Image (tube, coloured by chain):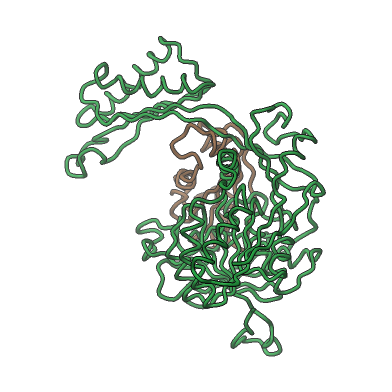
Chain colours: A green, B brown
């Protein structure tokens, strides 16, 4: 794997190896065609799918409790069917955290898909060890939000540590064509291939910091190619309906160019890259990761061609030895209701409706620990024409409250719905919901409590 | 003058903490931004919506500031009652911040 950098401008560095990593998903429900485009035309060595958000794994753990073969990403089969044959043809390896709460079952499902597609010999690896529920319970670790795992008692659903690049690199060294993890840290999905390809030492903090920066920039896929960026007339972006996902060209010294498939939608500019560099970052000099504390404070971003941005200056300092751990728990219930009003005086009727619901919830003694009363609206009821000249033409009220039981949560939406026959004139389109809320709290566990392992299987 | 006339912004969430980057369209405006968009101004701007503190980090090479707002997301994306549970739209809200006109007496020479 890995190409020799073609046409490197610097004499003496002509033989510096470069690998190309594509980012095929920025979240679990992301578009699939941009990943197909990358696999087909990206001239990639690796295709990474980052599909876990903070709460995803706790919800997946609930699925696994219901079905021992479940608990992995619901789009895994669709994605694998779409890209496995192309990746086989083009020699592209896949790394993903779509294993969620069940990487082994996800790997088995992937192997079965590969077999069904006739991709004989394709090697799939599952990385496990991030599930630290037993360890978290045993250590009664304190939570950042206050309280402890012990205090949450049987409300705790899951505890997953953010794991690093080493087991991913190990899986690749073992010949895996597809590596499926659970709660690996997002940037580690990219750092793993770099460590494997370039033989970076796990105490070379500077390179690990640079590799973390690569992962951080790429992991949200379309957010660096013009998604989550456009503002008409201010920051225009063409082709968001066929947005291209990014490619990182990474040299073995950690040097990075971010680009995308020519002709795909979107754009990569200094501005899109700078926004993504700081996305979900607190202190830019201390970006805590399992393998390193990355430092983005001296990063420089330079345009070297159309949709080609050169990013330099990332570095790192020694890891802390502590792993961020997400603890999922049954938190509460939320009940919601909405209803709309149009025409002259719409806002006044909306406010009256909110007042009525507020009074009803008090009268009927609905027990809420928190609530909010909102007015929403522009042109949802009758289009733009009638809306002309009114400010606003329509409002949609929204009431949401937190309760300790599902039965109480149901009452909130019911009180909004009864506005149909009991509330202001012309109330339409009532909607209600009640749902259980799985909360996520964070804790720090010593890395020594995690034992990662890699399971291989072959199609 | 509004902040949006000289800068763009992006917000992200981790737990109940929001970060909002503010990036000058022209890196030459970094000094002006650094003087007039302080942690105090941002805390004041969001005084009705956040319960915690505001910290600011400076990235002069990128012409950028990064604001970290705690207690900003009604408990965080997983449990917030808000319509925008992630606080994705907080960047647009911050860009409405009023700044003095450039060249006004309070700005540096």
B42 relative position to B92: left or right: right
Q: Where is residue A389 in the image (x, y as percent from the top left)?
A: 20, 39
Q: State the residue at coordinates (42%, 66%).
A: A266
Nearer to me, A390 or A260:
A260
Q: Quadrant of residue A206?
A: bottom right
Q: State the residue at coordinates (64%, 54%).
A: A104
Q: Where is residue A211 in the image (x, y as percent from the top left)?
A: 68, 66
Q: Where is residue A115 in the image (x, y as percent from the top left)?
A: 54, 66
A241 relative position to A310: left or right: left
Q: In which quarter of the image is residue A378?
A: top left
B90 relative position to A169: left or right: left
Nearer to me, A167 or A271:
A167
Q: Is residue A87 above or below residue A222?
A: below
Q: State the residue at coordinates (44%, 45%).
A: B96
Q: Position of residue A61 (x, y in %)?
A: 60, 41
Looking at the image, the residue that sits furthest to the bottom is: A11
Q: Quadrant of residue A169?
A: bottom right
Q: State the residue at coordinates (70%, 43%).
A: A325
Looking at the image, the residue that sits furthest to the left is: A386
Would residue B69 be seen by someone viewing this image from the given angle? no
* Quadrant holding the C terminus of chain B: bottom right
A200 relative position to B94: left or right: right
């Amino acid at each position: 794997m890995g190409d020799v950098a073609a046409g490197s401008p610097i004499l003496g560095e002509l033989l510096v190896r470069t690998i190309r990593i594509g980012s095929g998903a920025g979240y679990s429900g992301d578009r699939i065609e941009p990943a197909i485009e990358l696999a087909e035309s990206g001239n990639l060595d690796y295709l990474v799918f980052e599909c876990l958000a903070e709460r995803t794994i706790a919800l997946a753990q609930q699925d696994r409790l219901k079905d021992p073969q479940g608990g992995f990403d619901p789009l895994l089969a669709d994605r694998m069917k779409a890209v496995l044959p192309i990746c086989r043809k083009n020699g592209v390896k896949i790394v993903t955290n779509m294993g969620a709460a069940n990487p082994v079952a996800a790997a088995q499902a992937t192997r079965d898909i590969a077999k069904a597609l006739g991709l004989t010999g394709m090697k799939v690896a599952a990385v496990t060890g991030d599930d630290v529920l037993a360890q978290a319970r045993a250590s009664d670790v304190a939570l950042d939000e206050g309280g402890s795992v012990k205090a949450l008692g049987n409300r705790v659903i899951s505890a997953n540590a953010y794991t690093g690049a080493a087991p991913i690199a190990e899986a690749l060294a073992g010949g895996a064509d597809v590596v499926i993890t659970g709660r690996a840290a997002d940037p580690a999905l990219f750092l793993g291939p770099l460590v494997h390809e370039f033989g970076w030492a796990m105490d070379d903090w500077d390179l690990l910091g640079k590799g973390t920066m690569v992962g951080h920039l790429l992991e949200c896929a379309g957010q660096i190619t013009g998604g989550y960026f456009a503002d008409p007339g201010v920051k225009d972006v063409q082709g968001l309906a066929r947005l291209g996902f990014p490619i990182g060209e990474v040299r073995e010294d950690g040097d990075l160019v971010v680009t995308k498939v020519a002709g795909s939608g979107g754009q990569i500019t200094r501005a899109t890259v700078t926004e993504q560099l700081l996305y979900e970052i607190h202190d830019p000099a201390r970006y805590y990761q399992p393998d390193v504390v990355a430092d983005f404070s001296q990063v420089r971003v330079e345009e070297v061609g159309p949709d080609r941005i050169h990013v330099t200056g990332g570095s790192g300092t020694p890891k802390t030895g502590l792993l961020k751990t997400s603890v999922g728990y049954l938190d509460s219930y939320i009940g919601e209701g909405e209803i709309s009003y149009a025409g002259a005086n719409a806002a006044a009727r909306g406010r009256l409706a909110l007042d009525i619901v507020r009074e009803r919830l008090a009268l009927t003694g609905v027990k809420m620990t928190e609530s909010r009363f909102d007015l929403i609206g522009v042109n949802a009821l009758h289009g733009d024409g009638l809306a002309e000249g009114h400010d606003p033409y329509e409002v949609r009220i929204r009431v949401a409250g937190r309760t300790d039981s599902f039965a109480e949560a149901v009452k909130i939406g019911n009180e909004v719905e009864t506005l149909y026959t009991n509330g202001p004139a012309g109330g339409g389109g009532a909607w209600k919901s009640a749902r259980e809320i799985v909360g996520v709290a964070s804790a720090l566990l010593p890395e020594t409590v995690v034992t990662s392992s890699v399971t291989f299987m072959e199609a | 003058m509004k902040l949006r006339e000289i800068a763009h912004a992006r917000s992200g969430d981790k737990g109940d903490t929001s970060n909002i980057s503010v990036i000058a369209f022209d890196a030459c405006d970094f000094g002006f931004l650094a003087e007039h968009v302080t942690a105090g101004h941002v805390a004041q701007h969001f005084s009705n919506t956040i319960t915690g503190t505001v910290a600011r980090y400076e990235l002069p090479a990128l012409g950028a500031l990064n604001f970290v707002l705690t207690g900003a997301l009604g408990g965080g994306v997983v449990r917030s009652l808000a319509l925008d549970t992630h606080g994705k739209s907080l960047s647009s809200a911050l860009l409405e911040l009023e700044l003095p006109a450039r060249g006004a007496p309070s700005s540096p020479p």
